[in-house]
Amino acid sequence: MTEPPNVTADRRPGGRTARVRAQVLDAVRAELAESGHEGLTMEGVATRAGVHRATVYRRWRDVGGLLADTIAAAGEIDWQPPDTGSLRGDLAALNQEIQESLLVRPSFAVALMAASFHSEQAAQAQTRLWADRYAQCEVLVDRAVERGELTGQPDARSLLVAATAPVYHELVLLRADPDPDLPGRAAAAAVLAAAGGAFTDPHQQGAS
Amino acid sequence: MTEPPNVTADRRPGGRTARVRAQVLDAVRAELAESGHEGLTMEGVATRAGVHRATVYRRWRDVGGLLADTIAAAGEIDWQPPDTGSLRGDLAALNQEIQESLLVRPSFAVALMAASFHSEQAAQAQTRLWADRYAQCEVLVDRAVERGELTGQPDARSLLVAATAPVYHELVLLRADPDPDLPGRAAAAAVLAAAGGAFTDPHQQGAS
DNA sequence: ATCTTAACGCGACACTCGTCGCAATAGTAG
DNA sequence: CTACTATTGCGACGAGTGTCGCGTTAAGAT
């Protein structure tokens, strides 16, 4: 059985294979930092890594595969959601982080989104990464409930999406001018909606 | 002075030029409807339009240019924001429209977003289109204020973004499973936040 | 009707992209 | 150390992409 090599199924993960992977992923990060997701090309990465084109194509298939593996390598870092003492503060801090990651040039997050549109592999990696992050952030809502900031048991995911979506929408899709107040405003709005019971999933239609 | 022809600066907008443009834009829509933004290629459009490749390259430069002009042509249709009698109903209806446009396969809106990541021209056209749409929707908020649903004069744009962003975020970026309740939930949350005064700018109070 | 020239058709060209077969290299087992 | 083979390097190829020069067509002006 001579199947093509893969990133996930390491049949011979020894010295050279690991070394090539490290070189290539370093090259991806370097190219990305230099010219953004526009300049990220298979040939450029291969050349910078000192590796032949065919090797990169065989192991990573396309640009999306490169980004997906780069995420997988970077996803091992342990990220922690903010803890400021209040739900509103936590969400504002989270949004601040998001805004910075989107405004930094070149932005790794934006590159990943761009790649997700023409690479199923990158799209899956992106979906997985965000699912993890939102799951981790659910603790913010739990803490708020414990502190008595929220009554009932709101749908944490919906609340988090409501708080963070405007930041992505304004900066990525609408390409609005950067607004230092945006993270705080979006967070405050989500907290108000949550206080009003907007995210309590039982079919309790609010009166009037 | 023999400058290259352009879509915007029509130096000779007569019969043939307009005919070619119509053929090409029809071809763009047809290709888009058949194979989505993945299958949209300059050569394919030229062939389907019965026009030479070089002509398409000269007038539209790249795929983003094609989409940008297609948007410009489609932006002339008179779109009207919903009017259901209540702010929450209006926003829910608006979100319903958005969700349908994103879930239809192939989605013109998604194709436009994808193109915006590697074409400045398409990105500008997209930004312009959305700015127009959001400006048109501000009347929803005005009507709500007149009806007395909202106190004060909230920032209409922020309110609209808060209501619609979750739909884009869930379906496009997070690629969540379609949820028929999403449009209504997002609309309800935004209305609750607005009722709480989340979008009233404290610095610009008092003035009409 | 005639002239001017913007816009298009045509074919050729250089270039990039992704794939393939084969030889060389280097992990890994014995 | 030797044998085996997964993995890489290498070069060539076919297809696709974007550009260019030149001749032709047709829109707009007189």
Image: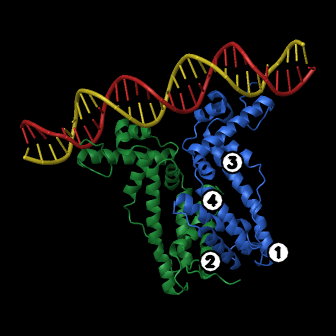
Chain colours: A green, B blue, C yellow, D red
Q: Is residue A112 left or right of residue B37?
A: left
Name the residue that disc number 4 marks: B100
Decide which of tag 3 and tag 1 comes sooner along the chain.
Answer: 3
- Identified by mark 2, the residue type is Ala
* Disc 4 crowd, CA 10 A, few/some/many (<14, 14-19, 20+): few
Decide: marks 3, 1 in contact (CB < 8 A)?
Answer: no
- Mark 1 → mark 2, Cα distance in angstroms: 22 Å
In the rendered image, residue B79, in percent from the top left (x then y), is placed at 76, 56
Residue at horizontal 55 percent and vertical 73 percent from the top:
A159
Q: Nearer the viewer, mark 2 or mark 4?
A: 4
Quadrant location of the N terminus of chain B? Answer: top right
Q: Are marks 1 and 2 on the same chain?
A: no
Q: Secondary structure at mark 3?
A: helix
Q: Nearer the viewer, residue B101 or B4?
A: B101
Q: Which residue is mark 3?
A: B125
* Dot label at residue A147: none
Residue A139: x, y in percent? 46, 76
Q: Are labels 3 and 1 assigned to the same chain?
A: yes
Confirm whether circles 3 and 2 share one chain: no
**What amino acid is found at the position of numbered circle 4 in the picture?**
Glu
CA distance for labels 3 and 2:
33 Å
Res. A193 mark: 2
Q: Is residue A166 visible in this depiction of the protein?
A: no
Find disc 1 in the rendering and name its residue. Answer: B146
Q: Are marks 1 and 4 on the same chain?
A: yes
Residue occupying the point 65% across, 68% down: B163
Of the two numbered discs 4 and 3 in the rendering, the one whose residue sits closer to the viewer: 4
Q: CA distance from mark 2 to mark 4?
A: 25 Å
Whether residue B96 is visible to the viewer of this picture, yes or no, is yes
